[in-house]
Every structure is written in structure tokens, then in C-alpha cells.
Amino acid sequence: MSDGQSARYRPAQHQNEFARLPGARLCSALTFVTVVLLVCSLPPVQQSRFAVNLTLQAFAASSSPHVLSPVSIDYPEDGSIFPPGLTPPTFLWRDAAGTSWDIDILFADNSAPIHATSKGERMQLGPIDPDCVSDSNAPPKLTPQQSAAWTWTPDTATWAAIQAHSVSAPATLTITGNRDGKLADSQSHISFTTSKDEVRAPIFYRDVPLMPASGNGGSVAPLAESNIRLIHWRIRDIRKPESHTVLSDMPTCANCHSFSADGKTFGMDIDGPANDKGLYAVVPVQKNMTIQSKDMVHWNTDGNVGTVRVGFMSQVSPAGQYVLSTFAGPELSRMIDSYYVTNFMDYRFLQVFFPTRGILEYYNRATGLRAPLPGADDPKYVQTDGVWSPDGKYIVFARALAREPRPHGQLAATHANDPDETQIQYDLYRIPFNGGKGGTAEPIEGASQNGMSNNFPKISPDGKWIVFVQCKNGQLMRPDSQLYILPASGGTPRRLRANTRLMNSWHSWSPNSRWLVFSSKARSPYTQMYLTHIDENGNSSPAIMVDNATASNRAVNIPEFVNIDPDGIQKIEVHVADGARIANGGK
């Protein structure tokens, strides 16, 4: 692009903001009429002087820039920070005035600007997985705002050039709308940066259908047993255009997964007898992994299903020696005595699930024994969501007063955040692990006793920060879930700028403590995956979407950065006790 073109589209930094408004021209016309009436009421000498001044101002105005209406640039947001190597994003904007657009990117390093034109491509949905189409869900559709959006996706070479020249200082993107190929009619600009901090690690996540199923007596299951096979586990290198399936076709449900901080150990909750999630698999991380019966930890060793119950939110320790989890405790004989669970036929938010009783226990892989963690084993409370500090010396967890999951006479909730849900608000606590001896649990200032439910903490690998979910009731996948950050020792919490308008949860830190991945329903009820940059002061950047993570009618949850090479996991196979293959990945 020539210098003349570059100058033409350079943002007008000092343009009168009033003149940018759509009604500015009408206001100007009304002002002119008012001025004429005012002049006519003046004495002749003053009329003459005023007329001369008005003529001079009119001449100056005639040579001023053409007044442009604003373009609404929806994505990326102003101030966004992209990870280096990310595949080309799709820019989104709305503009009722233009019929074609000039796209100009200027760089602070004085390198050649980039110019592109767009005739206007509308926003499109991604591919549909036909196996996940059901009477209990609806195909994804664009919102009215999305339907009005225009798009531009730079090619790979152009995006690489943009990233290369937007590291040292922000690049300025200007979108100018032209009507019928004539004079520019609309314009806006934003700035964005490419970070020096690489993501480096791939993201491992669960890829699920949203297909609630009705059962006998009005019961609802989040997924019919026959469709459990549709749950996939995938891994994504953000530098690649798509993800890779590593595990699928499971005949039994598997849930939360966890990797050790060193990337050498993998753990996963797996449903055991009677779907009590009584099994936990722990295996070394390899490119081709096989989970066998010898790798299974049997939580319910006495055979009484539900007596000891499931590990919940199990977490492998940084070096892989221990597994920390929430258990109902020996005095509770039924799983339903310690968890509030309600499923809905509304696929958008189809389940509410949180513990109301429970203690933290740790499993020692060397001894094969499981024991309560003193200081986090008080039956007066529910203690859950335990996570390890990077050095393995302390635990951060969520705690609340224990209560009945469903008090007698309580009405059944009919939707997420229904006031008839069992009400519970967690506070975050910190306790030393002390080789399994535990200690005194202390509340974390800024994440306790604040009138909200503070839950699902994640400690940055450098040990400086905790990012946690805050919502009104319960935990995790709530419509009002918001992400907050505060110092690991406690302090004033700050809402992340990356938060979207609807559900922000399932977050995980990159190994270098500079990126956070999380899930959100901002663009679709089918949950998608986003990234945000966290600087050394704990400041978050606007959310950056990871495109093409799955089909547009499937949902991404439990994304987790794994401290391995991008191609470090290719396939996971799971075998039952008799040695028959029950699940296979590597599609």
C-alpha cells in the first residue's frame, strides 16, 4: 500500500466526537436555523460582523474531513493480546452504513502497513456433528448481533506478518466502510498486541455433546447411557488449525482429568460399579498411553457402592506422588447424602452439581493407601476443590458449612440459578500439606466471607496468583460464573478483563504462568474455549477465542494446559480388567 493510501485511512485521532454521532448532521442543520433566527434579531452592525465570521467558519468547515459514522468492532476487543503463533483469527464488525470495507493495519515500528479490502462476508457457524443432533437440543444459530456481523480472516502469511510487527508496540487496525464504492461513510479503529510470551504447552480437554435425556418417573440424565461413547478427549496445539482426538468410544463415563505439574503423570475419574465414579486411573504420560486394570485405583475397596464414594475434582500432586480428592466420609452411606445434583432438559445449562458434605483425602501412590488430610477433614464442613501449590507444600480448597443436599420439603429447581436450588456459598482456605499431616486451615482474604460463592481455585505455576470462580450459588458451570484473581497469600480480588457475558469457568494456567485457558458460553450455548494473557502484575487481557476446537454443536469443558511437547500425547487406550479393549483414541 502506498503512503497516500496509508495516510487516507489513518485514524482521525482529534476528530470532534460529537461529529461522529449518527444524529450530528441533523443537529447541525437545526443549529444553523437557530443561528439565522438569532442573527436576524441583532442590530444591523452586529449582523454584518456575525455574517462575516459565520462565512469564514463555513469556509473552514467545508475543508474539514468528511464526518464518518462509527463501525462496531466486536472482535477482537481493543487492547487484546494474542499469543504468538496462534492461527489467524476472524475479525468481526457491524456496520449498517458500508457495503464494502477497507482494512488497514499500521505498525509502530514503521514497517510497511497492511491493506486489505472486504466485500463483506457474513459470520458463519462451524461444522455440525450429526451424531449430536437430538430432540433434546437445538442446532446452534447466530444471535441477531452475530447475524449482522461482517468478517475478515487474514491468510496465514498476512497474519504472520501482523504478529511479527505487533510485538514491541500495539498495531492499529482501522476498518473503513464505503457505500457503493463512493466516499468513505464509516470508520473505527482498535489496537492489539502480540505477546512475547509463548503458550508453549498444548491444551487437553473433554469434548462433549449436550443431549439431556428423560427417564422413568420424570428423571433426567445429562446424557443417555447409549451416547456416552460420543464423549471425546482432545488435545490442541494453538499453532495448529484443529485439534486431535486422543480418546473416544468409552463405554462408561469418565470425568475430571488432571496432570502433574511436571507433565509426567495423568489421572482421570472413571465411573466404577453402578456409576459411582469409584475408579481413578493414574498412569505415566506417554505419546501412546494404555490404561489397564493395574493402573486403576479402587476408591470403594469394601465393595459397598456409594459408602465411601467417589473422588471429586481429583488432583495429581506436582511430582505425581499423591492424588488429592473429596470424599463423602465413612459415616455417610449414600452418595445422594453428600451431593446436590439436578439435571434439566434445557441443554444450555443442563446440570447443577456441587458437594454439600465431604472431606479432603489424599492417596499415596507409593503405599496404595488413602487417608484424610487433618485440618480439612471436619464433618461440620464440606471441603472440596483442593489444589496443590507448585511446590506441593500446601493446599488451597473451598469450604462451606455442611448441609443436607435436599432438605425435606424443598421444591425442585427447574433451571440453573433457580432460587429453589439448595443454597451454598464456599470460601477459599489454605492449609499446609505437611507430608500428609495437614495443619490449621486459614481463610484466604479476598476470597472468603464476601457474600458470594468462591470456588474452583487454580494456583499459578510461579506461585504468585490464585484465579478462582465467583458466583452467587454453588460452583463452576453457573450462568453468572466470573473469574477473579488475587495474590496467592490473599488480598484484594480483581475481576479478570477476559470475563465474557455468560459463564466463565474451567480455567487452567499455562506452565509459564502467562496464559489462562477457560470455557465460556459467550458466543454459543455450546461451550467454547478462550485464552487470556496474565502479566507480571496479574492484569488480564480481553478473551481470545481458540477457533475450531470442536464441532459447533458440541461443548468444550475441563481444558487443561499440559507441560509436554505439543505432540506429546497421540493416543490413549483404556482396557477393562479382563484385558479387552473398551476405548480407543488416536482418531
Image: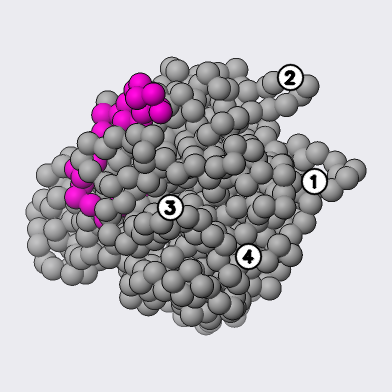
Circle nearer the N terminus (3, 2): 2
**Label 3 to label 2: alpha-carbon separation:** 40 Å
Q: Position of residue 35 (x, y in %)?
A: 56, 68
Q: What's drawn in magenta, residue-wise? A: 559-586
- The residue identified by callout 1 is 406
Q: How is the image coloured?
A: one colour
Q: What residue type is labelled 3?
A: Gly
- The residue identified by callout 2 is 216
Displayed quadrant of residue 16: bottom left
Query: Which of these two is toward me, 81 or 217?
Result: 217
Q: What residue type is labelled 2?
A: Asn
**Label 2 to label 1: alpha-carbon separation:** 20 Å
Q: Which of marks 3 and 2 is in front?
A: 3
Question: Does residue 517 show up magenta in the picture?
Answer: no
Circle nearer the N terminus (4, 3): 3
**Label 4 to label 3: alpha-carbon separation:** 20 Å
Q: What element carries label 2?
A: helix
Count of numbered circles in the view: 4
Circle nearer the N terminus (3, 1): 3
Whether pointer 2 and pointer 1 mark residues with C-beta atoms closer than 8 Å, the reply is no
Q: Is residue 106 left or right of residue 323?
A: left
Residue 79 seen from this side? no
**Label 3 to label 1: alpha-carbon separation:** 34 Å
- The tag on residue 368 is 3
Q: Nearer the viewer, mark 4 or mark 3?
A: 3
221 up-or-down from 205: above or below: above
**Label 2 to label 4: alpha-carbon separation:** 37 Å
What residue do we see at 71% from left, 62% from top?
379
Q: Is residue 329 left or right of residue 298?
A: right
